[in-house]
Amino acid sequence: MSKVQPVGAGRRAVFQSSLMSALLAGVYDGDLTVRELLEHGDFGLGTFNALDGEMIIVDGVCYRLRSDGGATRARLDARAPFAVVTTFNPSVTADLPPNLERDEVVRFIRRLTRSENYLYAVRVTGHFAWVRTRTVRRQDKPYRPLVEVTKGEPVRRFDDIRGVVAGFRTPLYERGIGVPGGHAHFVDDERRRGGHVLDFKITAATVELCPATDLHLALPLSDAFERADLNPDDLGQQVEQAENHR
């Protein structure tokens, strides 16, 4: 089963707080609260101040994913240094073939998209044979760059589990603004376990895509952001290492 509508069916906005390059540079404190982020949509991901867990927003509720693999509902006054949020109204829905791993799902999704030039919110819902994740630990000042923080993080695997992979597929020209390619987090159906997605294998799942035409950026008002090097020579390498190290 699949359902596809044209991207041009209407303008859709994504709201983003800060830049991926700022997070890479160690800008880990922001002033926007979860309450304020939820004013911009019901679906998204990000992190919390001091990298105190990963963030996932599904069905209008924000969860904090901890380094021990646990998930709890986030406080509305919790603050975030980086987040991407949208209202999830999918225009593409398809049943995934069984037994696909993450890279195969990415290739399947690519065939569903009409253009590589838009940003897509992506939701994969169903049963997973396994999901492999990692999650950042809370940091203390002075903050280290993200590539150093993510080195040696414990990898957790959840087997035979139902849940949601939520993420964004970002165009290559947005390198430094977002994460080119894919950036995804996972939470189980009970909203008790999850983390930053490294890999997974589905048993039976549905994928939904929500294309976006507008990107609204809110840059941090902080000394750390003002001083940060947002265009290092190895930006692409840093993004790959921080996001997709398996």
Image (cartoon, rainbow, N blue to C red):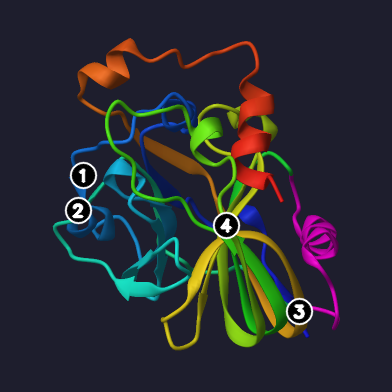
Q: Which mark is residue 154?
A: 4
The image quadrant that residue 181 belongs to is: top right
Do labels 2 and 3 touch, CB within 8 Å?
A: no
Of the 4 image quadrants, the one containing the N terminus is bottom right
Q: Quadrant of residue 72?
A: bottom left
Magenta-drawn segment: 96-115
Q: Identify residue for label 2.
A: 36
Q: Which mark is residue 202?
A: 3
161 is higher (above) or lower (below) than 41? below
Mark 3 crowd level (few <14, some 14–19, many ≥20, 10 Å Cα)? many
Q: CA distance from mark 4 to mark 3?
A: 22 Å
Answer yes or no: do the residues labelled 4 and 3 have beta carbons within 8 Å?
no
Which one is nearer the viewer's eye here, 178 or 223? 223
Determine crowd level at label 1: few under 14, some 14-19, many 20+ residues with C-alpha closer than 10 A: some
- Tell me if label 1 and label 2 are in contact, CB under 8 Å: yes
- Specify which label sits upstream in the sequence, 2 or 3: 2
Of residues 75 and 98, which is closer to you in this image?
75
Residue that mark 1 sits on: 32
